[in-house]
Image (cartoon, grey):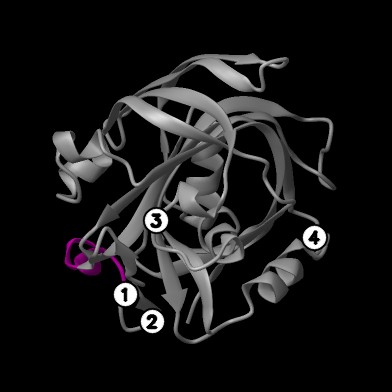
Amino acid sequence: MPDYDHILRGRLATQRNGRLDVRSGLHHFALINYALPKARLEPHLPTNRFEIPEFDINGRPLALMSAVPFVDVDFHFRRLFPFAKFRFGQTNYRVYVFDKERQEHCVWFFGTTLGSAVVYLARGAWRIPWHYARYQINCHYDQPAGRYTTYQYSVRSPWGAAEIDLEDTGEAIKQDSAAGFTSFAEMQLILTHPVDGFFYRLDGQVGSYSVWHETIPMTVGKARNLYFGLYERLGLLSREEMQRPHSVFLCPATEFVVFLPPKITR
């Protein structure tokens, strides 16, 4: 069995400081995970390079994917024009996969919606599958109670409309917060700390980029109402299935570094 603690410590180590790297504080961060048969996912990614792991969830072998909404509060290139900062909503759509070539857990991105014109820079310069969306966000965090009293997103986008309404229990995540894992370190590594992401570029080639972040302190959430137009359009989840996520984790604030530019993967 892999030493998940050792791998996680390696991912927490500080990485490079490139000219185009982006740093951003992320507020109102949620990790909304779904368990589903991997056969639904296989047509949407290159399985010659990426394996879709299955986890024992309620006695069934199932794959995992997620929707990850948050607010970039100060998105900026930390060495190039660090004074130019942007604030916008963002949602990443991704599958948890295993890179057979590099022998590591990572994610495959279907794409991302952003509520900023930054999306057009990324699409034009790097052919990355980012899509413009209009965001309405209503989130209120009760600091003394350590939980959200309101967590709501409404996203308007032809590519990836979404409705998100979550309840926060205020309970810190632990191993049994997400079924299918043999240890807390394994759950952290696979769900909360994949640092490499791959995707189909707009020109059809496979691209990739990496991120760095500290351990994310998260609490357990529950679904009040969830809808993701992308997952319905791709036939991955029905509207009814969207109301039953595998797990929901919430965090009021964290920080990410994104190592850019993205690379073309051969």
- Residue 22 visible to an observer of this rendering: yes
Between circles 4 and 1, the one closer to the viewer is 1
Quadrant where the N terminus is found in the figure: bottom right
> In the image, is 39 to the left or to the right of 66?
left
Where, by quadrant of the figure, is residue 12 drawn? bottom right
Q: Amino acid at mark 4?
A: Gly
Q: Which residue is mark 2?
A: 49
Q: In what element is the residue under mark 1?
A: loop
At label 2, counting other C-alpha atoms closer than 10 Å, the crowd grade (few under 14, some 14-19, many 20 or more) is few
Please check the rendered image and state whether residue 35 is part of the magenta-colored stretch, yes or no: no
Between circles 3 and 1, the one closer to the viewer is 3
How far separated are the C-alphas under marks 2 and 1? 6 Å
Q: Which residue is mark 3?
A: 179
Q: Which residue is mark 1?
A: 46
How far separated are the C-alphas under marks 3 and 1? 26 Å
Give how far across and how far down residue 257 sits, in percent.
Answer: 72, 50
Give above or below for 155 relative to 77. Answer: above
At label 3, counting other C-alpha atoms closer than 10 Å, the crowd grade (few under 14, some 14-19, many 20 or more) is some
> Residue at 26% across / 38% down in the picture?
244
Question: Magenta residues: mostly which secondary structure?
Answer: helix
| Towards the viewer: 264 or 44 | 44
How far separated are the C-alphas under marks 4 and 2? 27 Å
